[in-house]
Image (spheres, rainbow, N blue to C red):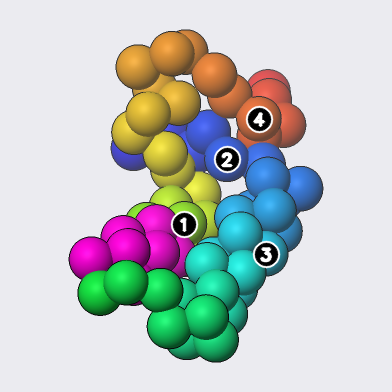
Amino acid sequence: MKKNVGSTEKIVRYIVAAVAVWAAYTYQVASPWDYVLYAVAGIMVVTALANFCPLWTVFKINTSKKQE
């Protein structure tokens, strides 16, 4: 796995995950949407920790700095 998630994007992903968990917990949205928000949060955290996003590979996006 080649890293394709940069440090700024990692921070954004953590923020999106925190907001998703906060929204699901605070607003007590309808039951199916709670699970969707928790899943989004989980995906964001895992991809930030792994520095790899499979979707970015499909679209050939790389936000990490090139290492020579």
Residue contact between numbered discs 3 and 1, judged by CB atoms under 8 Å: no
Residue 22 in percent (x, y) is at 57, 80
**What residue is shown with label 2?**
5
Q: Is residue 15 above or below residue 22?
A: above
**Callout 2 secondary element:** loop
**Callout 3 secondary element:** helix
Magenta run includes residue 35: yes
Residue 58 falls in which quadrant of the image?
top left
Q: Name which of mark 2 and mark 1 comes first in the sequence.
A: 2
Residue contact between numbered discs 1 and 4, judged by CB atoms under 8 Å: no
Q: Look at 55% across and 74% down and name the residue there.
A: 23
**What residue is shown with label 1?**
44
Viewer-nearest residue: 61 or 36: 36
Viewer-nearest residue: 43 or 63: 43
Separation of disc 1 and disc 4 at Cα? 15 Å
The circle on residue 56 is: none
Separation of disc 2 and disc 1 at Cα? 11 Å
Whether residue 39 appears in this view of the structure is: no
Q: What kind of residue is marked 3?
A: Ile
Q: What kind of residue is marked 4?
A: Thr
The circle on residue 15 is: 3
Residue furthest toward the front?
A: 30
- Relative placement, left or right, of 20 versus 32 is right
Separation of disc 3 and disc 1 at Cα? 9 Å
Residue contact between numbered discs 4 and 2, judged by CB atoms under 8 Å: yes
Image quadrant where one finds the N terminus: top left
Q: What kind of residue is marked 1?
A: Met
Q: Which residues are magenta?
A: 32-41
**What residue is shown with label 4?**
63
Q: Look at 39% across and 22% down and name the residue there.
A: 57
